[in-house]
Amino acid sequence: MQFVNLAEAEKINPLIPHTAELVVGFIAFSLLFIVLRSKVVPMFEKAFTERTNAIQGGMERAEQAQLEAQRALVQYNEQLSKAREEAQTLREEARVQGSAIIEELRTKAQEEAARITATAHASIEAERQQAITSLRGEVGALAVELASKIVGEALDDQARQSRVVDRFLDDLEKSK
Amino acid sequence: MRSLVRFSAEGEGFVPPSSNDFNLPPVFGNNIYTTKPILMVFFSVIVISVFFIAASRKAAIVPSKLQFAGESIYAFVRNDLARDVIGHEFMKFVPYLFTLFTFILTNNIFGIVPLLQFPAMSRVSFPYVLAVFTFVIFHYVGIRKQGLGKYVKDIMFMPGVPKAVYILLTPIELATFFLVRPLTLSLRLFANMFAGHLLLLVFIMGGDHLLKGVIGLKLVSPFAFAFGIGLTFFEFMVQCLQAYIFTLLTALYIAGALADEH
């Protein structure tokens, strides 16, 4: 029927809706709405949710890893400083022990030396005394025997005898 | 039939395109359900459905190019229109706003797609239908949220206003909510598409007519065509903008109805 109107070049008010178009508009739009709501929107929402989860999960994992790394670093540093301290203590101990050992050895050696020296002194002294004593006796007897042989007289007088010996010994010493 | 008019007009000189150019005859016989705009609206439904179903079918975490393209449009409507305007209850309205935006945008852009080249929204019936949908939805949402009495009362008697002002304000508010909003919503879209298409017709048919004239007019003709091409780009901007505005206003009306105070 539009035909006729057009052919007659009548102006048609463009604001007047057409029934067919109203019906089609309603149906087409509703159809599109149903399709998009049931098929498209849930899928996009699903993708969005999954993506959000994936990103959040990834970030959480990264955070966790970073925390663990930090914890490991702290632990490592602690262990390192502990080891250093221990080494320091050991060195100190070794030094102390070393000097103590040296000191002890030195003392021991000195003691030993002193002991040896003392023993030597004592034995020398003893031998000297012994020698003096034995010498004195022997020399006396020898001298007396010699004198009596030479003089030919018995020296029965004790006083005289010892005087004679002493004189002899003095002479002997002087002649030395 | 339009071409018939045009041929007959040629003998008498240039007939500028008029609103009659928007009344296209049925493609198949006399069936009024087979006019070009009607077929294009159905075609747009198929195009949008196929595109978005293909784009969203896999719903992969790492999207393909197709999925990314579909998601970008969906995310634009969902986040920038629905979420930012409506607030925490926005998810319920995303399917409607998404349908609205893609439906208007696709049909608008058909206005500059070669061979199709007719914006269905320049047929006022389609914007009317969409405006009625929006009208029903935002009032329904408001009534369900606040109850019929409180909803109507809040519209008629805006809280925090001196009583005397109601004499002036109540009719304005009633008109705004029940007449102006749906009318402006549909007419804005319709008029933009109608005027844009008319403008393109003027320059391109004018250029065509000039080409058939004397030599001087032939030389002017390329300028008319060039202007027509320039306007096509401009039209593209307007088409996107109008789809955005229609959807944005719908979201705003819904947000207003959901809010406790208007």
Image: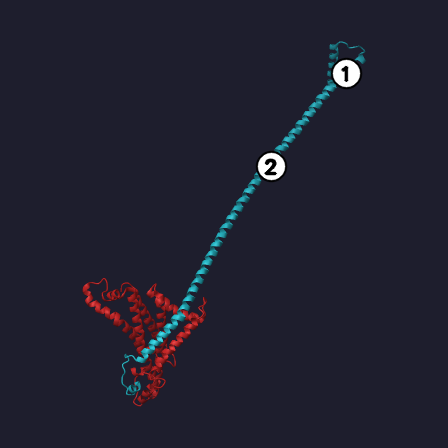
Q: Which mark is residue B101?
A: none
Residue under the point 37% across and 67% down: B78
At which x and y percent is residue B182?
28, 72
Q: Is residue A157 left or right of residue B19?
A: right
Label 2 Cα neighbours within 10 Å, binned few <14 / some 14-19 / many ≥20: few
For disc 1, the chain is A
Q: Position of residue B87 (x, y in %)?
A: 33, 64
Q: Quadrant of the N terminus of chain B?
A: bottom left
Q: Is residue B115 left or right of residue A124?
A: left
Sequence-earlier tag: 1 or 2: 2
Residue at the left extreme? B164
**Amino acid at the residue labelled 1:** Ala
Q: Which residue is mark 1?
A: A141
Residue at x-position 43% and y-position 64%: A50
Q: Residue furthest top?
A: A157
Same chain for mark 1 and mark 2? The answer is yes
Local secondary structure at mark 2:
helix
Q: Colour of chain B?
A: red
Q: Which mark is residue A101?
A: 2
Q: Nearer the viewer, residue A3 or B106?
A: A3
Going by the numbered disc 2, the residue's amino acid type is: Ile
Q: Is residue B108 visible?
A: no
Q: In front: mark 1 or mark 2?
A: 2
User: What colour scheme governs how the chains and residues are painted in the rendered image of this protein?
Assistant: by chain
Count of numbered badges drawn on the protein:
2
Looking at the image, is A2 positioned above or below residue A54? below
Q: Which residue is more in the foreground, A24 or B87?
A: A24
Determine if residue A133 is in view: yes
Residue B6 in the image: x percent, y percent? 32, 87
Q: Nearer the viewer, residue A76 or A27?
A: A27
The chain displayed cyan equals: A
